[in-house]
Amino acid sequence: MRKIIIGVMGPGANATETDLQNAYKLGNLIAQSGWVLLTGGRNAGVMDAASKGAKAANGLTIGILPTNDTSAVSNAVDIAIVTDMGNGRNNINVLSSNVVIACGMGAGTASEIALALKNHKKVILLTNHPESKVFFQSLSEDSILIANTPAAAIEIVKEVLSHY
């Protein structure tokens, strides 16, 4: 049986402390649920924090890297997929995930949310940016789901997966 992959997308260098705490908890809860975590794979921001959280719960982590340089891979990534595709790897992130959780907000995260919507994927927003919530919900009320905590995001994931 194919494993469930949950993508956690969020800012790297510009992640807030709240983003990092939420990402760590998300990764941990994803691993505890028996799912595989997929991130951007680098040792920065949300992707690193989520991977560390998953590893703390003995989870399996996949990192989709934007370059061909593996020196910036998070130490918490089990499987590093080297793409040398830059931001083009965002489509791989989204298409490889059963559900996408956007933790925080940045330009790259916004592009991943948009790609997910274009591909009819459910996206859970866990962010303190009210304008992001309004904007993305205006694009797709059915596919954008809002969570205020990592635990609430995981409950939404479970609900989404129950319809697969």
Image (cartoon, rainbow, N blue to C red):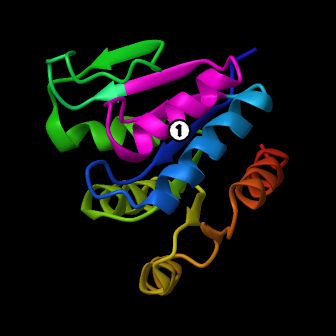
- Local crowd at mark 1 within 10 Å, few (<14), some, or many (≥20)? many
- On the image, numbered disc 1 is attached to which residue? 50
Q: Quadrant of the C terminus?
A: top right
Q: Quadrant of the N terminus?
A: top right
Q: Position of residue 158 (x, y in %)?
A: 81, 48
**The magenta segment:** 36-63
In the figure, is residue 82 to the left or right of 96?
Answer: left
Inspect this view and state whether residue 128 appears. Answer: yes
Task: Classify 27 as above or below 107.
Answer: above
In the figure, is residue 45 to the left or right of 128?
Answer: left
Task: Classify 19 as above or below 129.
Answer: above
Inspect this view and state whether residue 103 appears. Answer: no
- The one nearer the camera, 84 or 27, is 27
For image coordinates 43% across by 86% down, the residue present is 131
Task: Classify 151 as above or below 39.
Answer: below
Amino acid type of the residue tagged 1 in the rendering: Ala
For image coordinates 78% across by 30% down, the residue present is 32
In the figure, is residue 113 to the left or right of 162?
Answer: left
Task: Classify 140 as above or below 158.
Answer: below
For image coordinates 37% across by 24% down, the residue present is 74
Q: Residue furthest front?
A: 17
Is 59 in the magenta? yes
For image coordinates 71% across by 57% down, the residue present is 153
Q: Position of residue 65 (x, y in %)?
A: 27, 27
Is 17 in the magenta? no
